[in-house]
């Protein structure tokens, strides 16, 4: 049995890579992932990647931040230390809109950053998971899980027909920078 875990098709041109994705999908070969040095319009829909739910997390963190500061301000100015200044109410809501807005933005931004790092496993100090280091510079890489039932020679020929400049067989899941 082969020790190959992934078959990598390396492309020079994003249009050829998109053509390669079409050919692989036409032959019912599942694509593990695609690595590109820049965003490519339409690749998410072609690969069937769902929209991110990060916006929902931002909304929830923003609500938490706004509620937190509004509760703290109410407690401090009405219960803990009420001050009568010029006969105004103890808790004048328009005066606290700016600080509430700032805390809402603060909680939403930090919450989104932490949620993104948690969801993608991009913690500080962790080595990035990349199939081929050239995908971060100037190459476009299609990774195919080699454990499927399609013969490797057929996948190699499909990738070469689509315009791959190189087809590699990886025996490791990721390449390290060391």
Image (tube, rainbow, N blue to C red):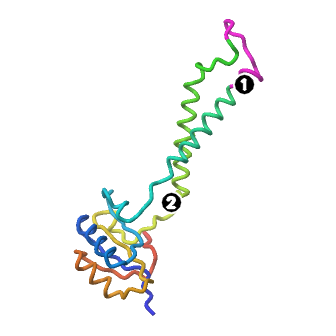
Query: Does residue 53 belong to the magenta stretch?
Result: no
- Tell me residue 159's x, y (percent): 28, 78
- Tell me residue 55's x, y (percent): 50, 47
- The quadrant of the picture occupied by the C terminus is bottom left
Q: Is residue 61 above or below residue 93?
A: below
Residues in magenta, as a range: 74-88
Q: Nearer the viewer, residue 15 or 127?
A: 15
Q: Earlier in the sequence, mark 1 or mark 2?
A: 1
Q: Is residue 35 above or below residue 171?
A: above
Q: Tell me the SS state at disc 1.
A: helix
Q: Tell me the SS state at disc 2.
A: helix
Q: Nearer the viewer, residue 25 or 135?
A: 25
The residues tagged by marks 1 and 2 sit, at their Cα atoms, a distance apart of 39 Å
How many labels, in total? 2
Question: Could you say which disc has been placed on residue 76 in the image?
Answer: 1
Q: Is residue 81 above or below residue 33?
A: above
Q: Residue at x 40, y 75 (%)?
A: 30
- Tell me residue 58's x, y (percent): 53, 44
Question: Could you say which disc has been placed on residue 120 in the image?
Answer: 2
């Amino acid at each position: 049995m082969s020790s190959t875990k992934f078959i990598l098709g390396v492309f020079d041109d994003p249009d050829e890579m998109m053509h390669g994705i079409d050919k692989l999908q036409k032959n019912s070969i599942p694509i593990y992932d695609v690595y590109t040095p820049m965003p490519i319009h339409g690749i998410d829909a072609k690969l069937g990647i769902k929209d991110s739910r990060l916006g929902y997390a931002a909304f929830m963190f923003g609500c938490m931040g706004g509620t937190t500061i509004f509760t703290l301000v109410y407690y401090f100015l009405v219960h803990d230390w009420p001050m009568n200044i010029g006969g105004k109410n103890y808790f004048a809501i328009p005066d606290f809109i700016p600080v509430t807005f700032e805390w809402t933005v603060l909680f939403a931004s930090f919450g989104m950053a932490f949620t993104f790092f948690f969801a993608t496993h991009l913690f500080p100090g962790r080595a990035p998971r990349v199939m081929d280091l050239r995908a971060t510079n100037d190459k476009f890489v299609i990774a195919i899980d080699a454990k499927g039932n399609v013969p490797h020679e057929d996948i190699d020929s499909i990738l070469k027909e689509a315009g791959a400049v190189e087809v590699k067989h990886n025996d490791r899941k990721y390449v390290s920078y060391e």
